Amino acid sequence: MTDTQSRTTSFGFREVPTGEKAGLVRGVFDKSARRYDLMNDLMSLGIHRAWKDMTIERANPQPGEKLIDVAGGTGDLARAFIAKAEQRRKTRSGEPATAIVCDINEQMLLAGQKRGDDEGIDWIVGDAEDLPFEDKSADCVTIAFGIRNVTNRDKALAEMRRVLKPAGRFLCLEFSRPTTRALERIYDAWSFNAIPRLGEAIAKDRDSYQYLVESIRRFPNQDAFADELRVAGFGQVGVTNYSGGIAALHTGWRI
């Protein structure tokens, strides 16, 4: 049964009324916003930065392009997109690239703005399932570690495709399924035991990080999510595993 057919949806390992999930997720990130970047480094042992760098390389930013980073949090991808496009502008000329960081959680956006270094970035509160942008207005749409938190993935994917220009590119970086049983056992031991304890010790919030671990397990595997992209109308859908499938980059084009 799909989210649109069901009156309940997953919130970690719990089933909750569909209308309550967005508020519950917002509460998780309200509590974790202040320590979000530090906790990402600790939870992934810093590897998330390499995953994001590889995502931006695949995004192939160009001078004058516009990025919409959905569930963009503190703006890592937006800053990297603009920086990479600026490197290319120095040799190719053209206009500076721009980016919009769109997140349903205002506290996350405020945490990102406090980091500074946000020239060319607009920060907008918005829901992935109802993006406040015009049709065909972005050259590239990204979402990193956010798609599993939306209530209705079908609707969010349709919205992200809607705002892409023809031939625009979509990149979704998300935790996924390890490709070997041995790695899966190590990953399970780390995530279920260490991550909630880190949340309790560093962010004073064990429950939010327990939810984050559980939400990863409820997310579809690589092949199943690739099928969702095809159903949403993306073309040339591809999947690249990072770190043995602990994370995966899903890509597609509006064609």
Image: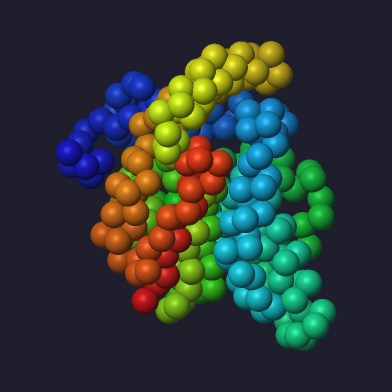
**Quadrant in the rendering for residue 20:** top left
Give the x, y percent position of residue 121.
70, 61
Q: Residue at x 64, y 70 (%)?
A: 61
Whether residue 168 is visible: yes
Left or right side of 182 for 123 = right
Q: Residue at x 52, y 23 (%)?
A: 186
Q: Residue furthest bottom?
A: 93
The quarter of the rendered structure image containing the C terminus is bottom left
Q: Is residue 2 above or below residue 165?
A: above
Give the x, y percent position of residue 107.
64, 38
Viewer-nearest residue: 230 or 14: 230
Q: Residue at x 64, y 41 (%)?
A: 48
Q: Residue at x 37, y 56 (%)?
A: 157
Give the x, y percent position of residue 225.
34, 49
Q: How many marks?
A: 0
Q: Is residue 31 above or below residue 176?
A: above
Give the x, y percent position of residue 233.
30, 66
Q: Is residue 250 above or below residue 150?
A: below
Viewer-nearest residue: 58 or 216: 58
Viewer-nearest residue: 25 or 167: 167
Left or right side of 218 for 65 = right
Q: Is residue 92 above or below residue 244?
A: below
The quarter of the rendered structure image containing the N terminus is top left
Whether residue 74 is visible: no
What colouring does the structure picture have?
A: rainbow
